[in-house]
Amino acid sequence: MTVLDVLAQGRLNLAGRLASASNAVFYGHAESGGERLPCVYKPVAGERPLWDFPDGTLAEREVAAFEICRALGWDFVPPTVLRDGPHGPGMCQQWVGPPPDREDAPADDGEAAEAGAGGAALLRLVDGDEPGPGWRAVGRAELGGGRTALLVHADDLRLRRLAAFDAVINNGDRKGGHLIPLPDGRMYAIDHGVSLHTDDKLRTLLWGWAGEPLPADVAAALRRLSGRLADGSPLALRLAELITKPELEALRARTEALLAAGRHPEPGGDWPAIPWPPV
């Protein structure tokens, strides 16, 4: 069976709830055909209503983000499905990284992703006004007591692709704690429920390439996505089950706009550019 089959059809056994999450989030395992996969389960019944996201569910948006990432040819969103579970319908996603009972487990809404390949961080605070070689500046962060530091992220192709992905899905909450780098060099990105709105709501820590030309491979991925979003295509039909028609049309428009501009977007003035808290 494939990972998606196990997540969608396997027996779902929950080990406990992640207390740090703002919505109901459970850790457990999906089991089927001798396969046992660690997973996270977010029931729709445990979602807090959001005034600016009145249509659909966060679970559906998480699945839509996975489908879009896969259509781009990228795999940094873990396999994600909709399924029934012990607390009703919800999102089930393969758990990546260490289990949550370990001290170095990634937090759902908390700590910045500080552990990566070779121990290098993806995000850090530095003194002074220059990010240093291999880093991109995001902006100054308040440390309390009148102190500030420069918040920077790694000048990393994985993050650059993720920045383009976030622009496509209009991610309103790209925090440091949503990045999960693994020791083998892979990196995953989680928590995409606050995305795919028709209005511009992009909030991210990955502004280091704002206004710069898109890399050739990113532009190629966007062209691939644009073709797969055509009316009547399998991807369009699947997304129509998860988001509204205006949201699907807005997704197409953002993809085409990025391709036409050929550059990473820059922060706008009508919406906070950086999520709070940032990590």
Image (cartoon, rainbow, N blue to C red):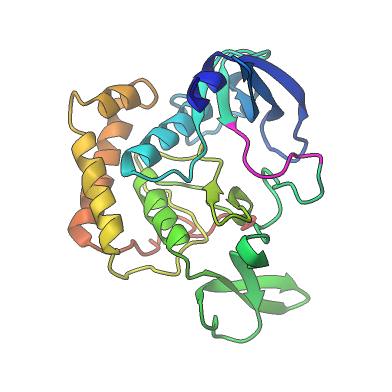
Q: Is residue 2 above or below residue 118?
A: above
Residue 98 located within the stretch drawn in magenta: yes
Question: On the image, which quarter does residue 20 sit in?
Answer: top right
Relative image position of residue 83 (x, y in whole percent): 54, 16
Q: Is residue 140 left or right of residue 239?
A: right
Who's the residue at 22% across and 42% down the image? 226
Residue 197 visible somewhere in the drawing: no
Who's the residue at 71% across and 54% down the image? 111
Quadrant housing the C terminus: bottom right
Q: Is residue 2 above or below residue 212?
A: above
Residue 63 visible somewhere in the drawing: yes
Relative image position of residue 37 (x, y in whole percent): 63, 27
Relative image position of residue 144 (x, y in whole percent): 76, 72
Residue 154 located within the stretch drawn in magenta: no
Who's the residue at 76% across and 51% down the image? 104
Residue at the front extreme of this rendering: 34
Q: Is residue 80 above or below residue 201?
A: above
Residue 40 or residue 146, whichever sits in front: 40
- Magenta residues span 94-101
Q: Is residue 92 left or right of residue 162?
A: right
Magenta: main secondary structure equals loop
